[in-house]
Image (spheres, rainbow, N blue to C red):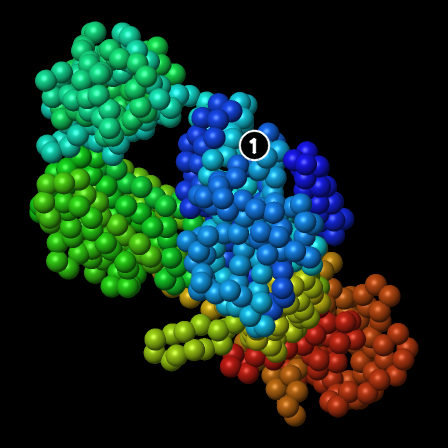
Amino acid sequence: MLKARSRKISLVLVLAMLMTMFAGLGTASAATGYSATHVPIVPADDKAHDLGAVMVSFDNLPATPFNQFIIKLPANFKYSATTFTSNPADYKNAAGLGLTGIVAADVYGVQLANASIIKPDPTSVDFKVFALYDAVGGSNQANILVRNNTGGIIQEVKFALNLNNVTVPVGAPEAINATLIKQPGSVFDDGMVQVAQTSSKAVTALAGDAVTVTGGGLETGKKLTIYFRENKDSALLKGNKTITVKLPQGFEWDEGATTFVTLANANQSDITFKKSDARTLEFNRGAENEKASIWKLEATQIIVDESVAKFGDIEVTIGGASSVSPSSVVIGKYADYGIEVKVADPEKKVIAGRKAEYVSDLKIEELIGDSLLKGRTIYMELPEGFRWVKSGDWNIPANGGVKYAAGFPKIDDNKPELLKIVIDENGTSKGSLEINRAQIDIAANVADGTDVKVKFWGNAGIDEEVIIGKVVSPISAEADLKEVKIGLQKQVAGNIVITEAEAEAIASSIYEDKVGTSKTALTVTLPFNVYWGNIPTVEVIEGDLELGTISTKDQNLTIPIKTSSSVASKIEISDITYTVDRTVPEGDMVAEFAGNAVVQALFTNRNYVTEEVVAECVTPAPGETIGSGEFRIGSNIYYEGGVAKVMDVAPYIKGDRTYVPMRYLGEILGAEVVWDDAARTVTLTKGDITAVFTIGSTSYTVNGEAKTADVAPEIANDRTMLPARFVAEAFGAVVGWDAATQTVLIQK
């Protein structure tokens, strides 16, 4: 009978598992929660042990008669009749459990006791939990049936599945997990919970609270502590050197200041110790078959040889006949008076050109108590291009035996890159000062990737430099370089691409204290005496940045930002022309990329993000001197290719038109000039262009094609004077007029 019942239960569970596999394991839901009450250490000795209980919770259990899931332990584990209940008489067949017609008649299991039901009311006859399994055959899995006969939803269901008297096999895994597998159609989810662990060692060593040791030994009132937990009876073996505990070089045990006591019911005098050498304690056990216990090694003082001891962790080595894990523990740190600066995130990103950027949190920590003395000063200095701001908004907790003096930390009024801290005392214990959510302004042209360094100095005994952030440049720029010629107008240049470092690096609005929120723009500024020849085409070629209406004025191109990006963007400036004054030097034409979209923190001479070469300025060839001529009304000084020269007649204005001398205009245009006295004509020739003007006539020809001017050439003071505009335009030049200086400008 027992064997037949065992086979049927196994078949039911196997089929249930197969159905689950075919249905798919699914994903976890927020409705079900599984956790362990505790994770005990148990020996893997093929004996029965109590594991941690599995706590099952469900938010809203629906009004269905049964919901099921399987609780399975690793292979070769065995449930007993008292695994889920303390009374072996509770283990019954289906009829005894009131499950006739629900499960097979020869299926056995238990109904969970009221003590295992937390919610709803455990006395309710309409809510019950059953665990069905084969205790006789030693199964490692059980089918859990949760019955809701209330006719409605039960909120916040919670019950415990005890796992007591479970056989733990030899070779059991170190982590003992209970696997929860939902049955088809069940509202419960899959899950896994660790309910116990095995120890590969019979004894576990655990260090107590870390201590600080100086040249004088332990701090006053501190104790060096190591716990030894026996994971089974008599784990600390009988005999000499059951364990040994050895300090590192430079440290010695003070036997008179050391004790070894039990924290549980054990023979206190069973284990004795002595020093086998200055650094080693030897423990000896006189009895066997003792109950497992926890033992505490405690020392109120150790001896330090400062000539040998090394600063840092004090690691104690554990040996002896007993099997102990780990083989060493760190019980504290050997330190001298001093201060250490700890930075939470040296890679904290800050954006160049921004105001009030948050840098990494940091902590100024005493190595031992009284390292920071009352009245002493610490200075924290940022490099050029950075300044501290808004110190009143920072979070500045103080811990232990130190605190900030009133009014500190404080930013220096005259040197905002300097932060001052004055120390006050709050006892003698080891302490620290924290600076959290500190803010800085960053100059716009600080290079991408620059470390934000803080130098610590002052009479508090600290001289250190740390990194509290890393600068990201908001934009970069690149141009397709082309040559432009000095002294010429509206010369076609290469495209420029502005690349945003990350989303929102180009701001669409900023808050200014005096004016509130204001809109922003990018600007591209050309060098002195170089001008935008037109309004170029500006468009976003990557990302989702939105631009406003583009404008130019003199050297400045303005690109309004309507909406900042959610994806890092690229802006292309194309169809560019430059007008280059004759005074511009040869070489790189460097533009500045700025504007309040990327520059909000203003620093002297640093209010641009980047400077990039956008063109190469070159001197025109001799035949290209067209475009560099200037005539000033009433003056016999004129300029040709930027060179001042003297004429024997001065230009003048007549009928709202400027007249310039034929000979000198021809030189600037690079044209040959011929005067025909008989025909009273002037012929100007350059290359394949020939222009003929007749004194007193508004008609003229260009390569034989008749044209009409609105004024006629004339002779004044025995010099032939030509209307500047019509002659220059005949040779493809442009005539400009500077009313302020009364100057005629001729350029190609």
Say if residue 541 shows up in the picture: yes
Above or below for 672 versus 725: above
Q: Dot 1 corresponds to which residue?
A: 77
Q: Secondary structure at mark 1?
A: loop
Q: Pinpoint residue 623: horizontal percent, then vertical percent.
A: 74, 58
* Residue at horizontal 53 percent and vertical 22 percent from the top: 170
* Residue at horizontal 46 percent and vertical 22 percent from the top: 200
Tell me where residue 674 sits by quadrant. Answer: bottom right
* Residue at horizontal 32 percent and vertical 17 percent from the top: 289
Say if residue 174 shows up in the picture: no
For this view, does 286 lie left or right of residue 146?
A: left
Label 1 amino acid?
A: Phe
In front: 519, or 247?
247
Q: Pinpoint residue 264: horizontal percent, then vertical percent.
A: 25, 30
Q: Pinpoint residue 488: horizontal percent, then vertical percent.
A: 66, 65
Quadrant placement of the N terminus:
top right
Quadrant placement of the C terminus:
bottom right
In front: 78, or 410?
78
Q: From this viewpoint, which residue is outermost toward the right?
A: 704
* Residue at horizontal 17 percent and vertical 40 percent from the top: 430
In front: 336, or 639?
336
Number of marks present in the image shown: 1
Q: Residues within 10 Å of mark 1 (few under 14, many from 20)?
A: many
Above or below for 293 versus 322: below
Tell me where residue 232 sits by quadrant. Answer: top left
For this view, does 690 lie left or right of residue 204?
A: right
Above or below for 186 versus 249: below
Q: Pinpoint residue 309: horizontal percent, then vertical percent.
A: 22, 17
